[in-house]
Image (tube, grey):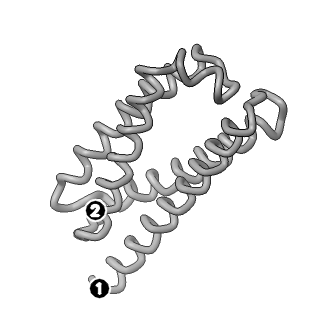
Amino acid sequence: MTHVRSTTLRTIIALDAAACGFAGAGLALDAELLAGPLGLSAQVLQPIGVFLVAYAAALIWLATRPALPRPVVWTLVAFNLAWAVESLALPALGWAHPTGLGLALIVAQAAMAVVVADLQFLALRRARLMA
């Protein structure tokens, strides 16, 4: 298994961890408060928040490793892309009926997940070229 030694990649993962942790804490702790303005159920928001906090913890752990297994980083790229697609699919398929604010939040976080996936991919590619 090959490993990637990249400060840039670890920084991207750490920033993703911060964003996921912050958003997750907000959703987990304030699901009832956010449900109305977002048009999404608190019973959906809270578990997503708890998941994001746990995911952030895993990302923090990864960001502190001096070298990252390449398959793990590819998994992060795939996960971020899947998260974006699934997020956009929920309202598109009628499985969720968010308010305008809720839809804007879903689209924005999906776009950020794609940006993070792209940055991770570019960091992987750069690390391979420098190796």
Question: In the rendered view, does 17 fall on the left or right side of 42?
Answer: left
| Residue for point 24% across, 53% down | 63
From the viewer's side, name the closer residue of 52 and 33: 33
| Residue for point 65% across, 21% down | 36
Marker disc for residue 130: 1
Provide residue 12's location: percent of width, then percent of height: 34, 61
First in residue order: circle 2 vs circle 1: 2
Question: In the rendered view, does 61 fall on the left or right side of 85?
Answer: left
In the rendered image, which quarter contains the C terminus?
Answer: bottom left
Provide residue 16's location: percent of width, then percent of height: 38, 51
Provide residue 81's location: percent of width, then percent of height: 58, 53
Inter-mark Cα distance, 2 to 1 = 17 Å
Residue type, numbered disc 1: Met
Up/down of 71 relative to 45, above or below: below
Up/down of 62 relative to 68, above or below: above
Q: Which residue position is annotated with label 2? A: 11
In the rendered image, which quarter contains the N terminus?
Answer: bottom left
From the viewer's side, name the closer residue of 51 and 27: 27
Mark 2 vs mark 1: in front: 2
Q: Dot 1 lies on which element?
A: helix
Provide residue 123's location: percent of width, then percent of height: 38, 72
Q: Residue furthest bottom?
A: 130
| Residue for point 52% across, 51% down | 80
Crowding at dot 1, Cα within 10 Å, few <14 / some 14-19 / many 20+, comes out as: few
| Residue for point 41% across, 20% down | 29
